[in-house]
Image (cartoon, helix red, strand yellow):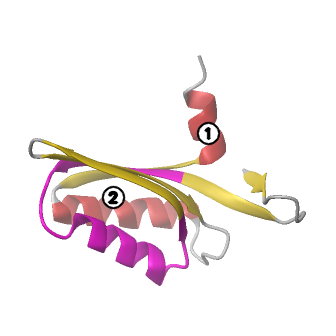
Amino acid sequence: MAAPLGGRGASMTRAVITVVGKDSVGIIAKVCTYLAENQINILDISQTIVQEFFNMMMIVDMTKSSKPFDTINTELSAIGEATGVQIKIQLEDIFDKMHRI
């Protein structure tokens, strides 16, 4: 679950967040505001719009968040529903295991 932080012996809990749906104003702002308010740091982000479809993938560090993973998952899903997109979060280890060939 925790991946080592470059040479310092510390660890971080990393997760993969995906956001998919019809594009609209404020999707990135809503997701990023939630992450900032919950001390979840964005490590990497990729976002594209193909015609009217929005797709974003983020790698985040959840180490400093005081909320349990299940709560974060539920709250992000609710933000997605309210925004008209689907938001999924998976711990990095689980994501890696699911996507091995």
What is the C-alpha distance between the residues marked 1 and 2? 18 Å
Q: Does residue 90 sit above or below 14 in this rendering?
A: above
Q: Amino acid at mark 2?
A: Ser
Q: Which residue is mark 1?
A: 94
Foreground residue among 21 and 67:
21
Q: Earlier in the sequence, mark 1 or mark 2?
A: 2
Q: Which residue is mark 2?
A: 77
Q: State the residue lying farthest toward the top.
A: 101
- Rendered image quadrant of residue 12: bottom right
- Tell me the crowding category of disc 1: few under 14, some 14 to 19, or many 20 or more residues within 10 angstroms, Cα based: few
* Residue at figure coordinates x 32%, y 51% from the top left: 47
Left or right position of 46 against 39: left
Magenta stretch: includes residue 88: no
Foreground residue among 78 and 97:
97
**Residue 49 place in picture, x, y as percent:** 20, 47
* Residue at figure coordinates x 80%, y 58% from the top left: 6
Magenta stretch: includes residue 35: yes
Foreground residue among 23 and 74:
23
Foreground residue among 68 and 41:
41
* Residue at figure coordinates x 84%, y 66% from the top left: 10
* Residue at figure coordinates x 63%, y 30% from the top left: 97
- Residue 65's mark? none
**Residue 76 place in picture, x, y as percent:** 37, 63
Q: Which residues are magenta?
A: 16-42
Proximity of marks 1 and 2: CB atoms separated by less than 8 Å: no
Q: State the residue lying farthest toward the bottom.
A: 37
Q: Amino acid at mark 1?
A: Ile
Q: Does residue 28 sit above or below 33 in this rendering?
A: above
